[in-house]
Image: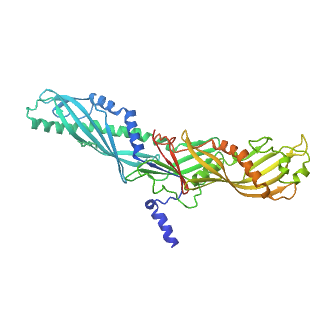
Amino acid sequence: MLQILCLCLALCGPLTGIRAEPGALLRLGMDILNHEVQSAMEESQILEKMAAEAGAKRPGAKPIKGLSNVKVKDVLVPVITLNFVPGVGIFQCVSTGMTITGKSFTGANMEITVVLNITATNRLLQDEETGLPMFKSEDCKIILGSMKTNLPSNMMPKVINKFIDSTLHKVLPDLMCPAIDAVLVYVNKKWASMHNVLPVGQMGTVQYVLASSPATTASHIQVDFSTVVQPQKGKAIQADGDGVAPGFPEDSVKDSSQLLLSAAFLTAELALLQKSLDVKIKGKKIGELPPQTTKTLAGFIPQVAEAYPKSKSLVTQIRIKKPPKVTMEPGKSLLHLHGTLEMFAAKRKGKAPVSLFLLETHFSLDVQYSVHENRLQMITSLDRLLGLSRGSSSVGDFNAKDLTGFTTDYLQEAYLPRVNDVLQVGFPLPDLLAINYNMAEMNIVENALVLDLKLD
Ligand SMILES: *[C@@H]1O[C@H](CO)[C@@H](O)[C@H](O)[C@H]1NC(C)=O
């Protein structure tokens, strides 16, 4: 049974979508691809270039029998229609029109106005050199629509039409098909930033690496990423997904674009911040808390009053001992922190503070996600104190449970603002196709965060 399972993991993997390493998945819907191709058309100013090209003398270009001095003018603003071709890529149709001028074999100036479609299949491949996705056009065709000429219609219309038709079929592909390729050059450039190493403050970096060739379905292109989380020093942090590969929820809107970030990946990213979550907090007055003094503490642990007859202010040190862990279930995400909370107070003025006691704590934070400047932001609030036990104590025995309320309030008022400060660094999102994530709607699903991308 186990052998069959292993064999299947090896062989069925690519078919069933089992992923060894959960990281991030991106679904590119038609909304994003339309936007990309449109803007590439505009940026490349391709039709203007094409018209200029057509006017230029091209050495080596075959002369067209019976038609000389060919020029293109009045190119209509193209309308682009894209469709997914499952397993292949996208079918592209550019509907446009233009006027072609030239001298006919009779020596007459000829003007032909045509509307036409240029169609091609843009195959989605993985560039062997760079490992990046790329589109490559295949099978470029020109489909002529209606045609008008300045030639009198009684002038052997059949012969003329045949001539025009065959001539255009010779001239147009050379003129128009390079336009499709040139547009793809622009689109392909926008994949280039995908493998960039993205900083997480000074703490480390994140990289999204294409895990396999992007797959095209009838409704989207799916890009699977392996994620590399690298601290400033030391080895990369492994995303440990408990063997569960997260997937897009069944009911997610089919045609829309979405980014999925696994809880395991977010956990790996948060490990970069673990050290920054260690803090030392001083000061008598913190938020709504009672004065942070030994006198307040003596209200919970009477022995403190014996050790400190005169009230002294407290210094609190919190250390996070295990990497933070993110969990997700539909509609709710928690951040689990395991650490110690140690309280210090100076015996006498001018003396170094000494440890009163150390508490082992485990608490969970509610996480709210948002995107700001293409970085994933988290804001936390206290969910629950899940574990509290006494470690060392210089004030004698006491029951840690007596400090439950005190500790809970302390974490909420004093510690969480620090945590939220640290989290402000934000986590970079995949940088490709100039995708803007800022308006994304957040959905928490089983073991993953799904961003529904909205175009501006
Ligand atoms: C050109 O493409 C458009 C949009 O796909 C379509 O409506 C039209 O019929 C096509 N015209 C020709 C001549 O194929």
Q: Residue 87: x and y, percent?
A: 37, 54
Q: Is residue 174 above or below residue 303?
A: above
Q: Quadrant of ligand 1?
A: top left
Q: Residue 254: x and y, percent?
A: 41, 52
- Quadrant hosting residue 94: top left
In the image: residue 58, left or right of residue 306:
left
Return the residue found at the far bottom. 1
Front residue of this view, candidates 427 and 387: 387
- Quadrant hosting residue 290: top right
Front residue of this view, candidates 105 and 314: 314
Q: Is residue 239 visible?
A: yes
Q: Residue 420: x and y, percent?
A: 66, 44
Q: How many marks?
A: 0
Q: Is residue 57 visible?
A: no
Q: Residue at x 42, y 41 (%)?
A: 188
Q: Residue at x 81, y 49 (%)?
A: 343
Q: Residue 402: x and y, percent?
A: 79, 56
Q: Residue at x 90, y 40 (%)?
A: 349
Front residue of this view, candidates 192 and 439: 439
In the image: residue 303, left or right of residue 61:
right
In the image: residue 204, left or right of residue 134:
right
- Coloring scheme of the render? rainbow
In the image: residue 117, left or right of residue 454:
left
Front residue of this view, candidates 227 and 171: 227
